[in-house]
Image (tube, rainbow, N blue to C red):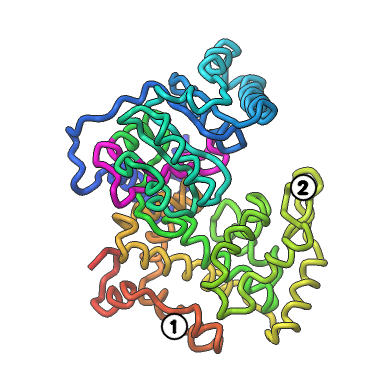
């Protein structure tokens, strides 16, 4: 009888062993002792009963921890609770959960319209709209109503956790807990350590993550943290390649052909093109020097093509069936003409290298800045949060197998051959250049 290992090459087996070791290392944080006293997490509150809030709540109910879900309107609260119920009912219908267990979990979930009811919560997780001012208002209120010692967490995916913490008189109790959607399914939890986050708050949340069966990875504070910051150049190149002559199916096909669960353009159709647009809107000044920056995504947004939710994005959707859309190629061609970008046949190797090497380059920069503690942490983020294949070991391990010298040479090639666009965006990370200059074969901070 064949064992699972018979299906993998020695290199793939080594990559999966790397991932296994990375999980063990991820909770080892310099300066955080193993014997540090943890804060109790016996009652949890979630602010927001939307898709994310409900999914987060399910994690705690599944672990037997009572959860209060706060909404401002009864209608929104009822709708959110019903979505949670339907999620559980689907699991019961598939035979993966008994009706009795579902009833017990639902009994642990209660709704409220009043912040005052959160006074005894040990952990409060805010999961409201991704807007800094709104989140700061929520934290001002939590600071007023929550008991001393309660951990106040934000589920922000991109925003400054330190700025959120500044809305309270207890920034040491504030931390970022970035769950990935759907939160009741995805294993990754980015634990964002603020400048003033207390050591026992960090240690407690890492232990809590294991209780709710997540893979926690510690990140420092920067825009997008580890995962979404690396997603930005990956998405930027995918968008640019459409203007230069590639099709969405070709770009995504190269990514899935490499082993990723989903191409980046399909990912944005799933997450919502409107969501990506609103994130870009908050940072327009940073991209002003590139008039073509994600222009096709912006155009799809203005056309109301938000992805799967509207049935049209980079692709057409009939229920869950995805089809190519010639109109997107037409839009790309019109934008290319408007921007003076020459169109040409683009090979799959170029798509692979421009998308993935710029993703890798950003990861190396993140490591150099100390946002990530180790390169293997970055691998975990991309495996458990974005569908990078475990058998490639994550993007950092993958880069080591390709060869850092080759990655650097490719980035420099496109810097020199893509004229002004190349000079603007294809700047190799300083650490990557140092690693290659010193003949290093593994990605480590030096």
Q: Residue at x 59, y 31 (%)?
A: 71
Lateral position of residue 204 relative to residue 289, left or right: left
Q: Secondary structure at mark 2?
A: strand
Q: Quadrant of the C terminus?
A: bottom left
**Which residue corresponds to the image point at 38% horizontal and 42% vertical from the top-left?**
168
Say above or below: 145 vs 367: above
Q: Nearer the viewer, residue 124 or 411?
A: 124
- What label does residue 321 carry, if any? 2
Residue 124 drawn above or below residue 250: above
State whether residue 12 appears in this view.
no
Q: Mark 2 or mark 1: name the one nearer the start of the chain.
A: 2
Please tell me in which quadrant of the rendered image residue 106 appears: top right
Q: Which residues are magenta?
A: 174-203
Does 22 sit above or below residue 231? above
Please give the name of the residue rendered at 72% of the width and 80% of the height, measured from the top-left corner: 336
Q: Is residue 34 above or below residue 283?
A: above
Residue at 54%, 72% (x, y): give it.
285
- Please tell me whether residue 179 belongs to the stretch shown in magenta: yes
Q: Image quadrant of residue 420?
A: bottom right
């Amino acid at each position: 009888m064949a064992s699972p290992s018979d299906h993998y090459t020695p290199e793939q087996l080594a990559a999966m062993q790397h991932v296994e070791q990375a999980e063990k290392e991820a909770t080892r944080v310099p300066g955080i002792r193993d014997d540090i006293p943890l804060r109790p997490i016996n009652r949890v509150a979630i602010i927001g009963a939307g898709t994310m809030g409900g999914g987060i709540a399910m994690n705690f109910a599944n672990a037997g921890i009572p959860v209060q879900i706060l909404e401002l309107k009864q209608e929104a609260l009822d709708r959110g609770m019903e979505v949670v119920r339907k999620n559980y009912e689907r699991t019961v219908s598939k035979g993966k959960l008994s009706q009795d267990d579902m009833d017990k979990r639902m009994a642990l979930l209660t709704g409220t319209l009043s912040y005052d009811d959160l006074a005894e919560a040990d952990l409060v997780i805010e999961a409201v709209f991704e807007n800094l001012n709104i989140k700061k208002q929520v934290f001002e209120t939590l600071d007023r109503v929550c008991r001393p010692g309660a951990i106040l967490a934000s589920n922000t995916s991109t925003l400054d956790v330190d700025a959120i913490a500044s809305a309270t008189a207890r920034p040491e109790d504030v931390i970022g807990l970035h769950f990935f959607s759907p939160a009741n399914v995805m294993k990754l939890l980015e634990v964002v350590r603020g400048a003033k986050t207390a050591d026992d708050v960090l240690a407690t949340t890492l232990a809590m993550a294991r209780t709710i069966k997540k893979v926690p990875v510690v990140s420092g504070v920067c825009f997008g943290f580890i995962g979404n910051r690396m997603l930005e150049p990956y998405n930027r190149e995918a968008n640019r390649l459409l203007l230069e002559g590639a099709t969405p199916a070709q770009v995504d096909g190269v990514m899935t052909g490499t082993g990723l669960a989903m191409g980046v353009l399909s990912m944005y159709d799933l997450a919502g093109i409107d969501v990506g647009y609103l994130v870009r809107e908050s940072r327009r000044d940073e991209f002003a020097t590139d008039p073509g920056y994600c222009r096709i995504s912006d155009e799809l947004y203005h056309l109301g093509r938000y992805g799967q939710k509207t049935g049209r994005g980079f692709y057409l959707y009939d229920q869950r069936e995805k089809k190519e859309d010639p109109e997107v190629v037409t839009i790309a061609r019109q934008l290319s003409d408007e921007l003076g970008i020459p169109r040409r046949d683009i090979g799959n190797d170029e798509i692979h290298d421009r998308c993935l090497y710029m993703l890798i380059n950003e990861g190396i920069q993140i490591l150099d800045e100390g946002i990530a503690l180790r390169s293997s942490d970055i691998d975990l983020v991309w495996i458990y949060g974005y569908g990078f294949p475990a058998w490639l070991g994550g993007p950092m391990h993958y880069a080591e197998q390709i060869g850092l010298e080759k990655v650097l040479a490719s980035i420099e090639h496109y810097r020199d051959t893509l004229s002004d666009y190349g000079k603007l965006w294809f700047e190799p990370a300083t650490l990557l250049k140092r690693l290659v200059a010193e003949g290093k074969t593994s990605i480590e901070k030096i």
